[in-house]
Amino acid sequence: MAPGAGLDAILRPRSIAVIGASQDATKIGGRPVQLLQRFGFPGAIWPVNPRAAEVQGLPAFASPAALPEAPDLAIIAVAAEHAAAALEECAARGTRAAVVFSSGFAELGAEGEAAQAALGAIAARTAMRILGPNCLGAVSVAERSIATFSIVLEGALPPAGPLGIASQSGNLGSYTMLLARERGIGVSRFLTTGNECDVDIADAIAWLAQDDATKVVLAVLETCRDAPRLVRALELARDAGKPVVVLKIGATAAGQAAAASHTGALAGNDAVFDAVFARTGAVRVRSVEALLDLGHAAAVCGGTLPRGRRTMLLTASGGFGVLLADAATAVGLELPAPEPATQQRILSVVPFASPRNPVDATAQMGARPEVLVEILAAILDDPNCDALLLQLAASLYVPRLRGVFLPALKAMREKHPKKLLMLSVHGPADAVAELTALGIPVVDGVDASTATLAGLCALAEARRTPTPPTAALPPAAPLEAAALCTEAAAKRALAEAGVPVLPERVVQDAAEAAAAAAELGFPVVLKIVSPDLPHKTEVGGVVLDLGDAEAVAAAHDAMLARIRIAAPDARIEGVLVSPMLRGGVELILGSKRDPVFGPVVLVGLGGIFAEIMQDVAIRPAPVDEPEALAMLRGLRAFPVLDGARGRPKADIAAAARAVAALSRFAAQQAATIAEVDINPLLLRPEGQGAVALDALIIPREDRP
Amino acid sequence: MAPGAGLDAILRPRSIAVIGASQDATKIGGRPVQLLQRFGFPGAIWPVNPRAAEVQGLPAFASPAALPEAPDLAIIAVAAEHAAAALEECAARGTRAAVVFSSGFAELGAEGEAAQAALGAIAARTAMRILGPNCLGAVSVAERSIATFSIVLEGALPPAGPLGIASQSGNLGSYTMLLARERGIGVSRFLTTGNECDVDIADAIAWLAQDDATKVVLAVLETCRDAPRLVRALELARDAGKPVVVLKIGATAAGQAAAASHTGALAGNDAVFDAVFARTGAVRVRSVEALLDLGHAAAVCGGTLPRGRRTMLLTASGGFGVLLADAATAVGLELPAPEPATQQRILSVVPFASPRNPVDATAQMGARPEVLVEILAAILDDPNCDALLLQLAASLYVPRLRGVFLPALKAMREKHPKKLLMLSVHGPADAVAELTALGIPVVDGVDASTATLAGLCALAEARRTPTPPTAALPPAAPLEAAALCTEAAAKRALAEAGVPVLPERVVQDAAEAAAAAAELGFPVVLKIVSPDLPHKTEVGGVVLDLGDAEAVAAAHDAMLARIRIAAPDARIEGVLVSPMLRGGVELILGSKRDPVFGPVVLVGLGGIFAEIMQDVAIRPAPVDEPEALAMLRGLRAFPVLDGARGRPKADIAAAARAVAALSRFAAQQAATIAEVDINPLLLRPEGQGAVALDALIIPREDRP
C-alpha cells in the first residue's frame, strides 16, 4: 500500500466510536469521550460499552454491531487481550480505521509480538487501517477530532496552524504539542504510531506531506521498520515542497540500547539515518525544543529561506555579539565582514558602533532606537548578507523601544521580502506574535536562534541541491561461491564491478612466479591464495618488496614451506604475484549490512584514523560519485587527502569512483554478500588513480 | 592590592551620591535615582546636579564638595570628558568608591585608552576604588542598593538569594539577572566591571567568594587583563568552598575577534582558560541559560553533589528515556545497569517496566502514581547510583499526579540525604519552587537537565581533586644567547632542564665524526650545526642512517661541500653526530607565550594529528607530572599511545616527565624565550623512555 493511504479516516473522521468507553474521564476509555465533547467535535460520538446505557451524557451502544452506522474511526480502549476481538467487530461493522490505545504487545517481547501480529493481520485482511497498538492516537486541531488520551489535552488544544506532528513516541509527540500550545504555535495534526502493527511513521509523514492544512512536518523517529517506505514518504514531502524536521532519537549506543528495549526493533546505524535524511532533504535536530523552533521558523518564513550561510549578526551589546559569534560558528554559519560601504553607512548612523560582523550598535540602540531601521537597511542591502540575525535580548519588554523597533522591522521585512530577517529575542509573547505574523521568525536564546538559522540554511540547501537519481541498478547475477573465497577471486569480482586493482597473476610454482614478476615489473609482492587462510600475514603468507627473479623464486618456495608447517590442512590454490606500489595514502573501503537499511558503504583513512579515531563515513548503498565525494569531504582527516601542509594532493576523484563502484556492487549483490573489506585502497597522487591492494568478501550466511 | 579589597563601599554603601543625576528616569543619570527610591534603599541618596535644586523629589547638590558627608559610593553618570573631573571631586570629598557608567573610553581605541588610564591613575593615587568605566554598575538585592541603570530593573528585582553575578559584560550580566527573576531564582549581588580601569573581574569574584550572602559565584568573562589575579580570585572561591560557574565567551576565532574589538584586550588562547578553570575548580558553561541552570542547581543541592558520574535515569516514557540516554551520554555521564536485585524490586512494583537504565516505569506511573516512591527507593538504594535523574515531562500540571509525586520525592529526599536526586520537569512554577525548597534541583528540558547534572559532577570532582601545588619555582639565571642559536645548544639547555636527549657530539672534521660515531654506536645521524641554518633539511644539512665509519666520514665531507654551495655565508660551528633511533611514536612538544597567561606548554602527536587534526593539549606553564599526564590523556589520539588495537604501549610516564620538564623550563625562562619546539620527541615503548630528537629555542625579541 502506498504510504499514507487510508489515513483520512483517522484524521478527518465524520464519526468516532469509542470501544471501551468509560464514565471516568481519567481512564483511557473515558478521556476521548470527554475531550471530543469538550473541544466540540462536530461529528457523531458513539461510546461503546456493554454495561452502560449512557457514557458521559451520551447514549452508549452495547457493541460495534449495535452502532447506528459504520463509523469512520473506532478508538480501541480495551485491555490488550480484548483488542483483536474488538477490531474484528469494528471491521465487520465496516469501520474504515481504528486507533488502538491498548498496550501489552510487542513492547513486552515474543508473546506480545504474536498478539500484535494478529492485529496486523486484521488490517491486512480487512483493509481497515490500524494505528497502534500502544499509541497515543491522533488529533486534527481544526476539525476538533480528538482521538487521543494524551494528558496534555487536559489543558487546552494548541491553536490550529501549519505544523503536522508525526511521532512514533506518544509522549515525545504530545510533549511537542504541549510546547507548541504554550508558545501559541499552530498545529494541524498530531499522529502517534506506537508499535506500528499497520500504520507506520512513513504513512504518517506521507499523509501529512499531502495534507493541505500541514505546511511543515515534524517527525519523531525512534526506529524504522520499513526503510524503503520511509524514504518514499520523505521524498513525497520533499516533492511537495514541505520541509521535514526530524527528531531521530537513539543517536548514541546507550540511546540505541534503550530504543531497542523500548520498541523491540533493531536500531540501525545512526549515521545511516543521517545519510537518508541528507538525501531526502529532511533536517535533523536533537531535542523537542529544537524540533519546534526549526519547524515553526520554517513555517513562519515560508519561501524566504536564506540564500546561503553568510549571516550578519546585529546586536546592541558587545557581550551578546561575542556569544552570538561563538554560537553561529559552532553551528556552521559564516560571518563575512560587511562591505566597506555598508560599514560606512552604519558608522554614519552610530559613530561608535562596531561595524564588522557581529555589528554592535552599542547602547545607542537603546538611547536612540530610531537608528535600528537605518542599520537594518544598510545590512540588508549588503551583497554579502544571506540572512540577518538581530539580537534584542529582553528589550521588547520596554514599551519605548518596542514602539520603535516593531515598525522598523515591519518596514524592512516589506522592503526586503527575499532576504531572511530573523530575531533572537526573549519575549514578550504578544510582540513575538506580532513579528511572527509579519513573517519574521523569532527564537528565544542565543544558541537556539543560531541553531535554528543553521537549520533553515540546511532546509534551503536541500531545496537547492538536485535530487540524487533514485537507485535503479540492473539486477546482477549472484556471485559464484568461488568468487567469495580468496583475495584473488574477490579482486576479480570487484574489478569487474569497477573497483581498480593491480594486474596480478596466480602462479603454481617458483618459475611461474619469477616469470609473472618479470612481466609485471619489479619489485613485486607474493601472497598465498587459499580459501582457508583469510588472514594471510599470520601464517607468513605475505612477502613484500622482491626486487628480482631470483628473490621471487626463493620467496615463493620458502612461503609454501612455511605454510605447509603453519597450516598443513589448508587448501592452497597458488601464489598471487602483484606489483609492489609505494607512495600515496591508504584508505579503508567496505560495505556491510545495516539491520534497517540493508547494504551500506563505508570509507575512512587507513590505520589510526578509521580504527582509533572512528573517522569513517557511512551511507546506504548505492551512492553516486558526487555523494561518494561528499563522504570523503566529510571525514575529519580529509585535509590529509587534500594537500594540507604541503602534502601531495591525493587522487580524490579516483577514490570517489572506487567508493561508488563498491557501493553499486554491494547493492547489486545484497542477497549474496554480507560484507566487503578493501584494506587498503592505495590512493595515489592526483591523476594517478587508486588501487585495491587487498580485498575480502564475506558471503551472507543465508545466501540463496 | 588583594583581589576584592575595598569593594564593600560598592556593594554595601550607606550613602550613594549620583553625579549627573537627572530628572528624567529614562536617562542613565536618572534611572539609579528612580530605582534606589522605588526599591527602597535605606541609606542616603544624594543627587548631584548644578542646575537643579531637586531631582525626582530629592534635594540636589551642586557638586560633590557640597554633599553633607563623604558618600560611601558615587555613581558617575556624566559624559566621558567630564568623568575624570567628577572622580577627582568625589575623591577630594572622601568618597570610598565610584561606579562610572560613562562610555567612550578604551572601547574606542587609543585616544579613549589614554582617557581611561587617567581614571585608573585617580584610583591608584587616591585609593578610591573605581568600577567601570562603561559598565552597568552593581546591585545588592537584600540591601536594596541599586547602583545601575540596567533596563532589566525597569521590571522587578530578583528575589534575594544565593547567586552572586560577576560580569565583565553589562548586558550579559543583567540578562542573567532577568532570567533569574523570571524563574524566581535568588540573587545576592550583581556586579559588572566593564572596561576595568581599576576594579576587575578578579576583584568581583574574590569579593563574592568572601561574601556571606553569596553561596555560588556566576562569572561572565570576555577577557582577562591580569591572569595571576584571576587565578588568585578563583582559588579564594575554591578555598571558601563556593562553586564558581563561568561563562567565558570568545571560544571561537570569530568570537575572539569580536571580543578583542569590544574590549580592546588581546584574547588569549581559549583552551588555556579551560586549563585555568580546571586547575581552580571553576566549571565552564556555554550559555547564559546554562550558567543559571548550573549555578542554581549547585545552590539548591548545597553539599549534596553527586559522588560520581554513575547516573540512573528514570522516566515514564520510552521515548524520553532514549532522549535522556542520548543526552546523558553526550555530556559524559555514565549509565550503569542497576543491580539485579534492584531490577527485581522495580519489576515487583511495575511488572512491565524496563528495569535497566534508563528505567522506564511506563504509563503505569500515570495510572498508579503511588509506584513512584517504591521505584525511587529501589534506585536510590542501588550501590551503582551516584545520582538519580527523574524525568516527569509536564505531569506536575496534573493535580492528581502532583499530589502523589511531591510527597514521594520529599520522603525520598529525606531518606537519602547524601544522594543527589534531581528532576527534569516542565513546570508548573509553584511545584518547582516546592521541590527546590526540599533541596531537589529541578531543570526544564532533557538537554539542560543532563548538562546541569554533568556540571554538578564536574563541581564535585573539582572538590575531590587535590589542589595542584602552586607553582613556586626557584628563579633561573637567564639563558646565554648562545644557548638559543643551534640545535646542539638548545638540546644541552633542555637536557639540563630535565628533557631527555641522546648522547651527541659536535665534531669538526670527518675523522672526528667517524670516531664519535664509533663511540656512540652505529647507525648514526649527521646534522649541520649553524646559528644561521635553523632549517637544516632544506640545505642538505641532515643525513640519516649511516652504518659504518667510512660512510660517516664521506657523508660529513659531502654535507659540508653541499652547504658551502647552498649557504656560502652561513657560520658553521661543526657537525652533530647522534645515534639513529627507530621505533616508537613521535610527539610534538612545545612552549609559547600566551598574551594573557604568559608561558604555556603544548603537546600533541606528531604529523597529521597536531598539524591537521588540531589535536593538541595546552596548559599554562609549569605543569606537574600528573597534569602533564592529564594533557596526554585528553588527546583524541591518546589510544595510539595507550596500546589500542594491538599496538605497543608507549612510555606515557616518560612523555609526561618530558612535558613537565619543558614546562618548568619555559616558566623559569619566561623573560628570555618566546618559544620552544621539540619536534619530534620520540616516545619509545613502555619502560624505554623518550628522547628529544630535534629542538629549537626562539628567544624573545625583547629579552633583557
Image (tube, coloured by chain):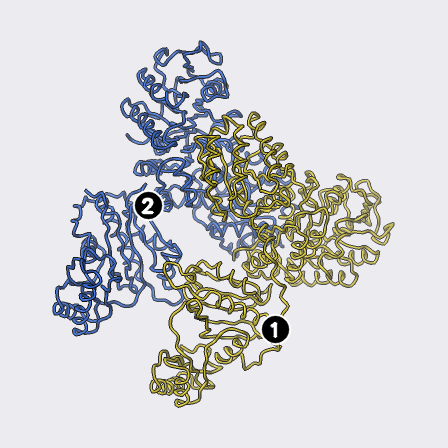
Chain colours: A yellow, B blue
Q: In the rendering, at what x and y percent does residue A628 appear?
A: 53, 64
Residue B126: horizontal and vertical position, in percent? Answer: 28, 22
Give the CA separation, mark 2 to mark 1: 59 Å
Q: Would you name the residue on which mark 2 appears?
A: B466
Q: Is residue B534 left or right of residue B574?
A: right
**What secondary structure is marked by label 2?**
loop
Q: Front-most of B686 and B632?
A: B632
User: Tag 2: residue type?
Assistant: Pro
**Is B632 situated above or below A649?**
above
Name the kind of residue labelled 1 in the image.
Answer: Ala
The chain to which mark 1 is attached is A
Which quadrant does the N terminus of chain A fall into?
bottom right
Q: Specify the label residue A421 is tagged with.
A: none
Query: Is A170 left or right of B682, judged from the image as shown?
Result: right
Give a yes or no on whether discs 2 and 1 share a subunit.
Answer: no
Outermost residue to the top: B53
**Residue B464 seen in the figure:** no
Q: Which residue is mark 1?
A: A671
B39 relative to B675, above or below = above
The answer to which image quadrant residue A229 occupies is bottom right
Residue nearer the viewer, B638 or B395: B638
Secondary element under disc 1, as helix, strand or loop, is: loop
Question: How dense is the environment of label 1, judged by Cα within 10 Å: few (below 14), some, or many (20 and up)?
Answer: some
Q: Position of residue A420 (x, y in %)?
A: 58, 42
Residue A334 placed where, x, y %?
49, 47
